[in-house]
Amino acid sequence: MITLAPQHIRLHAGFKTKEEAIRAAGQVLVDCGAIAPGYVESMLGRERQANTYLSHGIAIPHGMPQDRGLIQRTAIAVVQVPAGVVWNEGQTVRLIVGIAAKSDEHLGILAALTDVLDDAAAADRLATTSNPQEIIAALSRRDAGGSGSGDLAGAEEIEVVMACTAGLHARPATFFVEVAAPFASDIVVKHGEKSANGKAMASLLKLGIPGGAKIRIQAAGPDAKAALEALAAAVAAGLGDEEEEDIGLGVPSGIGAWEAKSYGRAITGVSASPGLAIGRLHIFQPTRLFFSDSAQNVDLEKKALVSALDAAQNQLDEIHDAVTARCGKSKAAIFKAHQALLDDEDLIEEVKVRIDSGRSAAWSWQHSIESRVAEMREIEDERIAGRAVDLHDVGQRVLRHLAGATHDTALPEGAPVILVADDLTPSDTAKLDPSRVLGLCTASGGPTSHTAIIARSLDIPAVVGAGPAVLEQTNGILCILDGTTGQLYIEPSAADLESARAYQQDLNSRREDEAVARYQPAMLTDGHRVEVVANIGKVSEAAAAVEAGAEGVGLLRTEFFFLDRTSPPSEDEQYEAYRAMIEALNGLPLIIRTLDIGGDKVLPYLPLAEEENPFLGVRGIRLCLRKPEIFVPQLRAIYRASTHGPVKIMFPMIATLEDLRAAREMAEQVRQELGVAPVETGIMVEVPSAVMMAHELAKEVDFFSIGTNDLTQYVLAMDRMHPALARQVDGLHPAVLRMVDLTVKAAKKSGKWVGVCGGVAGDPLGAAILTGLGVAELSMSLPSVAAVKARLRELSLPAAEKLARRALACSTADEVRSLLLPSGAK
Ligand code: PEP
Ligand code: MG
């Protein structure tokens, strides 16, 4: 049972429109940490589907069932509008009771509300009172309960069990009334001693029926039988309020998200990196730099500039190497870009001109950089505008050297902290030491910012986009940061602290358990098995994949042989590397993808014509077919290596049957020349045309592996590298999932198996949905293997299939993600 408190009540409000009023009720729920802001849209969506006006100037807006994941905890908000707001024609609302229901804890309040509905004077009092306690008292009566309609004369009656586990709250009651309304018969619902008019929502709510309760439905009239049948079926099906099966996906531990129990202060942001941190806040203040604006000796200033630039370049080298070691090459690439920014000759010339005019090197540098930063921010192309943060970052680095500042961190000595900042630059984030930083919370930024990406790879729980309120908190206060749900709880209660600590312990032991069980297969509870394999990109990762629990390699990106060198690798060199990997895998399968170059990856020794749209150009197999001098040695190396263990060949970027046939023909010719046995050959399905031609392609391959990274980019027409689109390029978009579904169905017809090797395979929710869609093999980066295996072992195939059906029926990626993930954990 939940309680109403003054912070749930807003008095004396005034609105011009119903939408404003619903948003205000939603805001109260957001402010008290009950919902993520997205749920407000759901409340508006619900209102468009069904009118939540009850009577006597009272409405109860609430969200849609599929958005329940956006609710942190069950809560009620009351917004009083003494002058009224028009809800619908002829309906004016003066008391808005906004509902965020995760469970049936609010039914007591709804039951009390129905008493008010029967009493015009009481409704009027609550719509005008200046005392929130009066509203609290009226809606907190425990003895509220229906009486209303007695037995219907001459009625037929059935007994049914309330299937929706959350009970007959607002959503299912609306559904019940919608089913009952078209029938001419009178309908009464009976629960114990109480009874209610089955066509009146307010009356039904009064019954306060909990989930699993037995109810009797009576109908009297010409269509009584049909009405009872329809209502019995609707109740049995859950009254449109299907409960989501919580299998703990989306939380690394698989133990469900942590839930705060008390109504402390909470700031809602966006989940950027999952996990729970408990600690004191430290508000990060970038170091202020002091320097004089003029200088006497031009030569000395120019020398100072050159040595500051050198020092910054050296630092960036060090940071690049450290981040590569901690987070991988791709995350570290940003620091190479920073170095390139410092190589800008025009910039340096401009600074020197300023120095010549009698300014100090520091002043000149800062002015030149900041005017460029300002110009960049103005540029409409968001991709360029986004680089302003990098230029500012690198500019500050040089400036620190010029101003003689030795270090730029503002972390206090002593116990580790939850770091709060407006936003962190890439270098601020890269410097973070997980042993000193328990969690991160930024006022701005999004889940795809560098902060978020690096925090995830450092395994630091993080919340971004929490708004300016987070910067106004007192330094040093105790907080709980929930990176999974995107919440920062300020000065939580002792009970919440205790439960959060217990949760952390569970999480740690769960991770240990996952690691211990990493060699066990991903066998679902009903015996269905999914193969969990690894994506690797270098020789040493083959052994690491086995160590991580992978059952083989589902994708070897062979680009690594070809990049960062001045001439192509020889056939022998490749053969040795493949053979070393086969040996490290010791009998486990290795799927070798032939070179996928082009697009954003270019080889210095393979000059290609400049392309307007490289991702739509001569990329992947298209390039290999045009460059047999590259393709044939690779095929030879693969076939030679295949004599040492189970190897499969996979061609990337197949868009047409012609490309597949040409590639197979070249491969077959190589095989015959070498006189070795055939190997299984498959293709990446990552181009929409391959999905649409999957029936035909399936007949000519042994397997498909769906590359959801590229498939998403091509299906949604969104560059997968575009920073401004990063939030939307989501492999769990229903459009992509429907493509996966089509591919699996087509492959099954030809008896071929389908794997997925794009990023969604390593996402616990993605892995469950893909399993439900019939994908047989999931290939992912090494850190995901143990966790995905553990999650799948907790799932049954029917549950996965049900989840997949729900996902396919969703309209947006957010809807898919909210199927199981707690709010904000995108
Ligand atoms: C993909 O496109 O999903 C994929 C796995 O290939 P890559 O990321 O190497 O393009
Ligand atoms: Mg790809």
Image (cartoon, rainbow, N blue to C red):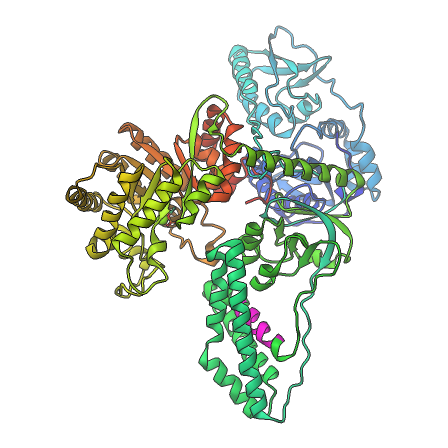
Q: Give the image quarter of residue 407.
A: bottom right
Nearer the observer, 25 or 505: 505
Is residue 443 toward the left or the right of residue 670 in the image? right
What stretch of residues is rendered in magenta? Answer: 390-400
On the image, which quarter does residue 186 sit in? Answer: top right
* 771 sits to left or right of 787: left
The residue lying toward the viewer, choosing from 231 and 618, is 618
> Is residue 433 within the magenta segment?
no
Q: Measuring 46% from the left and 71% from the top, which residue is drawn there? A: 340
Q: Residue 502: x and y, percent?
A: 72, 36
**Residue under the point 30% across and 54% down:** 573
From the viewer's perspective, tell me whether residue 701 is left or right of residue 240.
left
Q: Residue at x 53, y 22 (%)?
A: 182
Q: Is residue 397 magenta?
A: yes
Residue 104 point in image, percent of width and height: 68, 27
Between 192 and 744, the residue placed more toward the observer is 744
Q: Is residue 564 above or below residue 588?
A: below
Q: Which secondary structure is most common in the magenta stretch? A: helix
Quadrant for the C terminus, please.
top right
Residue 732 seen from this side: no
* Residue 694 in sight: yes
Q: Quadrant of the N terminus?
A: top right
Q: How many numbered dots are placed on residues in this image? A: 0
Q: In which image quadrant can residue 364 be found?
A: bottom right
In the rendered image, residue 765, in percent from the top left (x then y), is placed at 51, 37
- 151 lies left or right of 46: right
The spot of residue 821 in percent (x, y) is 56, 38
Q: Nearer the viewer, residue 691 or 536?
A: 536
